[in-house]
Image: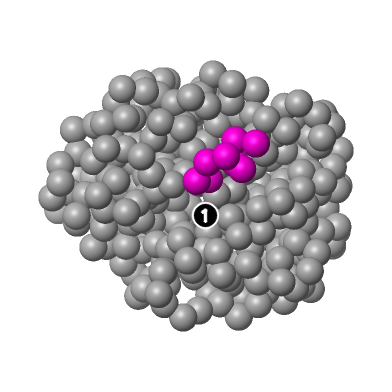
């Protein structure tokens, strides 16, 4: 019997994902896609990256697929978690285990080879993520990211961008120089204490309008200041975030996506009930047509083109 590397303890204060989520009152349309979720390990099978900024709980593919079925989701897009660095093994394992019901977003380094990219593509990966949130990554050198973008463009992949709204003025020129479609996580993390028609959010909307950009209207639990939280049966949570999500859905109905963000890495205030997060959706997508585009048509077009939902 060989010795195994001892498992690392969770980051102090880490909030585990919500156990026994409620059954949503809002019924997702058939074919709905959770276009932003993650897997963590399990650590015994898929080691966390030595350079990680946090050590999470285990949250593997079995738990993700159980949540998928509980919520009434048909498919998932699994985004590489920063705790795994550029080792995409856990994410790829989950995508392969889904039997075609998941796609993946990878993290790769500038020296990634064509053979590795083609293996990831065959496994179901359809994009890479560039992270500009300073508390999660040490640096995002733009020359390295340009090289990665050049390598993935022939595959038809897109780039997922994670940044905070205050940093958009410094990053916009770089983003618009990239040779692929762009997908923005969590509405570009707007400051929801500022006006929805104010200059900061208006700049973000014009960035979307003028480029090949898709937007995830996700993670109100990360953006909300006044709540209420998606807990204790609250079916209209995070009302301070609603105007921002609704504005994006109204302006760009064909370029919006939604996801749970399960298992909700790095939350510090509370861990939301994922069933109640589903019940948040009708607040931002108020018509059946908007909801079908957000949950079915748009993610299918981006991740399963040519397939029927």
Q: Position of residue 136 (x, y in %)?
A: 49, 28
Numbered disc total: 1
Which color scheme is applied?
one colour
Q: Is residue 125 depicted above or below 84 in this figure?
A: below
Pointer 1 local density, CA inside 10 Å: few below 14, some 14–19, many at least 20 = many
Residue nearer the viewer, 9 or 90: 90
Residue at figure coordinates x 62%, y 76% from the top left: 72
- Residue that mark 1 sits on: 37
Q: Identify the magenta region.
A: 206-213
User: Can you see residue 222?
Assistant: yes
Horizontal arrangement in the rendering, residue 85 relative to residue 64 (left or right) = left
Identify the residue at the far front of this view. Answer: 210
Horizontal arrangement in the rendering, residue 296 relative to residue 117 (left or right) = right
Residue at figure coordinates x 82%, y 46% from the top left: 243
Residue at figure coordinates x 23%, y 45% from the top left: 4
Asked which quadrant contains residue 147, the reply is top left
Horizontal arrangement in the rendering, residue 126 relative to residue 300 (left or right) = left
Q: Position of residue 31 (x, y in %)?
A: 56, 77
- Where disc 1 sits, the SS reads strand
Q: Position of residue 35 (x, y in %)?
A: 53, 59
Q: Position of residue 188 (x, y in %)?
A: 62, 37
Asked which quadrant contains residue 276, the reply is bottom right
Whether residue 233 is in magenta: the answer is: no
Residue at figure coordinates x 27%, y 62% from the top left: 123
Residue nearer the viewer, 228 or 111: 111
User: Can you see residue 262?
Assistant: no
Asked which quadrant contains residue 150, the reply is top left
Residue nearer the viewer, 55 or 279: 279
């Amino acid at each position: 019997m060989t010795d195994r590397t001892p498992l690392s303890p969770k980051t102090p204060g880490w909030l585990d994902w919500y156990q026994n989520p409620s059954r949503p009152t809002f019924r997702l349309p058939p074919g709905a896609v959770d276009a932003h979720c993650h897997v963590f390990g399990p650590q015994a099978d898929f080691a966390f990256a030595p350079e990680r900024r946090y050590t999470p709980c285990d949250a593997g593919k079995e738990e993700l697929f159980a949540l998928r079925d509980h919520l009434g989701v048909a498919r998932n897009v699994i985004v590489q978690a920063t705790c795994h660095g550029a080792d995409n093994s856990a994410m790829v394992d989950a995508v392969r285990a889904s039997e075609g019901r998941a796609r993946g977003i990878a993290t790769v380094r500038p020296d990634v080879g064509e053979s590795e990219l083609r293996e990831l593509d065959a496994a179901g990966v359809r994009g890479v993520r560039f992270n500009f949130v300073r508390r999660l990554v040490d640096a995002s050198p733009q020359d390295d990211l340009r090289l990665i973008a050049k390598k993935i463009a022939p595959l038809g992949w897109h780039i997922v961008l994670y940044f905070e709204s205050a940093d958009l003025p410094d990053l916009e020129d770089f983003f618009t120089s990239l040779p692929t479609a762009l997908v923005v996580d969590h509405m570009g993390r707007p400051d929801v204490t500022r006006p929805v028609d104010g200059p900061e959010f208006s700049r973000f909307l014009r960035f979307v309008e003028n480029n090949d950009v898709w937007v995830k209207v996700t993670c109100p639990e990360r953006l909300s200041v006044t709540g209420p939280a998606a807990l204790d049966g609250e079916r209209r949570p995070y009302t301070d975030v609603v105007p921002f999500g609704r504005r994006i859905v109204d302006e760009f109905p064909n370029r919006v996506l939604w996801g749970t963000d399960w298992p909700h890495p790095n939350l510090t205030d509370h861990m939301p009930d994922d069933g109640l997060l589903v019940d948040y959706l009708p607040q931002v997508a108020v018509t059946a047509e908007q909801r079908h585009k957000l949950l079915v048509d748009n993610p299918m077009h981006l991740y399963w083109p040519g397939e029927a939902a």
